[in-house]
Amino acid sequence: MHYDYLVVGAGIFGAVFAHEMKKQGKSSLVIDKRSHIAGNIYTEAVNDIQVHKYGAHIFHTSDKEVWDYVQQFAHFNHYVNSPLAVFEDELYNLPFNMNTFSKMWGIRTPEEAKRIIDSQIAEAGITEPRNLEEQAVSLVGYDVYRKLIEGYTRKQWGRECRELPSFIIKRLPLRFVYDNNYFNDPYQGIPEGGYTQIVGKMLEGTTVLLNTEYKAFINDSAKSGKDTFGKVLYTGMIDAYYDYCYGALEYRSLRFEEEILEDCDNYQGNAVVNYTEWKIPYTRIIEHKHFEFGKGKGTVITREYPAAWQKGDEPYYPVNNEENNALYQKYKELADKESGVIFGGRLGQYRYFDMDQVVRCALDMVKKETCS
């Protein structure tokens, strides 16, 4: 059979693209190396609790067109992301706001909080930050950095903060109000019934092959002549596509440790609790039932461990430092010269995207394809 597009990856980027192309009368064959659709936003019901199998995903956006678009596929509840942070025996609210500062310093007013932070910044005397640690201290002072940033960041990146470039942190928002809403975006929520249904609805009427590796599939198709394609949308790793001919780009990986607690209805009282001290190996514990306000029997928690990435591991996000960005540009030059293949998504474009940005980029790619 001939398809207009071979879509490599049944995550949200590939699903949006295939869905919109179908509306344009274009056919797609979607393949994915995993045993399920939905990529990293895959959710699975466990005791009537929608478990985010690859880490917490909270949909948030300032793009009303994107928000209206995803509403077609699920009803979103009014969940507001308000994570907590544990440092030793202390519990703090995130993002950094007056609840955080009141607990940290025993103060009540924004003026008191600003005075302490400004004093610590002035005492540090950092005018040209040389690394992430100096950048963070120059923005929020020593106390917030030490208790809420340093250990978490070391775990997340696998390096000392003094070894990380300053540009990783461009700004650290300080909110001098008692507001625990992590995001500033006006649209925010969790799809009732999980994310997998969204991708499933997008891919209705489209042929999907799971447990299918791209290169093995291409080789088999070339030999058999069974399936042909007009064009390829590739959402996997761009360096892997080119057999790492310039070397491997750097990624960070994650390991998830899931635990079903049949006899506990409420483990931590919040969906996301970060652990910011270095000696605790995981960065956060997710209690999934709180995304849908306590629905389900017992509870399910997931501990999230950052991990170094090696070839063969699952890449979760790119390390966008100057060296990797320069290497990516070399791969992009190859991609720009190649006819019949387009690259999309976090791995194909080597950029850290939030979910709404993935949807937006996929919609924009559809427009570009249909206008070309």
Image (spheres, rainbow, N blue to C red):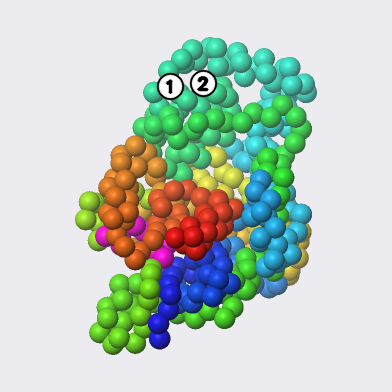
In this rendering, position of residue 5 left or right of residue 275: left
* Callouts 2 and 1 close, C-beta under 8 Å: yes
Image vertical order of residue 144 relative to residue 186, above or below: above
Q: Residue at x 39, y 64 (%)?
A: 234
Q: Within 10 Å of the Cα at label 2, are there few (<14), some (14-19), or many (20+) other Cα atoms?
A: many
Instruction: Please say whether residue 241 is one of the residues in the magenta stretch.
Output: yes
Q: Mark 2 or 1 closer to N-term?
A: 1
Q: Secondary structure at mark 2?
A: helix
**Residue 43 shows which numbered tag?**
none
The percent coordinates of residue 254 (x first, y second) are: 45, 55
- The three-letter amino acid code for the residue at tag 1 is Pro
The percent coordinates of residue 208 (x first, y second) are: 48, 79
Q: Secondary structure at mark 1?
A: loop
**Which image quadrant: the C terminus?**
bottom left
Nearest the camera: 85 or 234? 234
The percent coordinates of residue 271 (x first, y second) are: 67, 53
Looking at the rendering, the stretch of residues picked out in magenta corresponds to: 233-242
Residue bearing mark 1: 129
Residue bearing mark 2: 138
